[in-house]
Image (cartoon, helix red, strand yellow):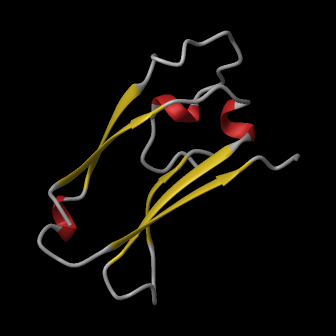
Amino acid sequence: VPPQLTFSSWHVDEGSTDNKIIELSVDGGASWTTLVNCALGVGTPRPFCNFRNDPRAGTEWDEIVIDTAAFAGQVGQLRFTYNTNDA
């Protein structure tokens, strides 16, 4: 696990209605630490947690940086969950 997780994100959706969750496990998946949960406000604000229903260009990506310093140097697994809640 690096000191920070950095990636690019692109979305057009219903914001917090379409919940996004990012979790990290450092024990082989036995337990998970929530880094971001848009619906619960954990690890927010994040651009991908906001409502965005417009003609966004395919080149308009958001840079996301998440602090993972507490887990740095450990072997980890990431889990990304996207729940539309209505489809």
Looking at the image, is 72 positioned above or below residue 76?
above
Instruction: From the viewer's side, name the closer residue of 80 and 49.
Output: 80
Q: Percent x, y for residue 18?
A: 71, 41
Q: Residue at x 45, y 76 (%)?
A: 32
Furthest-right residue in view?
A: 86
Q: Residue at x 67, y 9 (%)?
A: 55
Q: Percent x, y for residue 86?
A: 88, 46
Instruction: From the viewer's side, name the closer residue of 58 and 42.
Output: 58
Looking at the image, is 31 positioned above or below residue 48?
below
Furthest-front residue in view?
A: 58
Q: Percent x, y for residue 4?
A: 20, 51
Looking at the image, is 76 positioned above or below residue 5?
below
Q: Quadrant of residue 68?
A: bottom left
Direction from residue 84 to residue 3 in the image, left or right: left
Instruction: From the viewer's side, name the closer residue of 49 and 42.
Output: 49
Q: Percent x, y for residue 50?
A: 59, 27
Q: Quadrant of residue 35?
A: bottom left
**Number of marks:** 0
Instruction: From the viewer's side, name the closer residue of 72 and 87.
Output: 87
Quarter that holds the N terminus: bottom left
Direction from residue 38 to residue 25 in the image, left or right: left
Looking at the image, is 50 positioned above or below residue 37?
above
Q: Residue at x 40, y 26 (%)?
A: 62
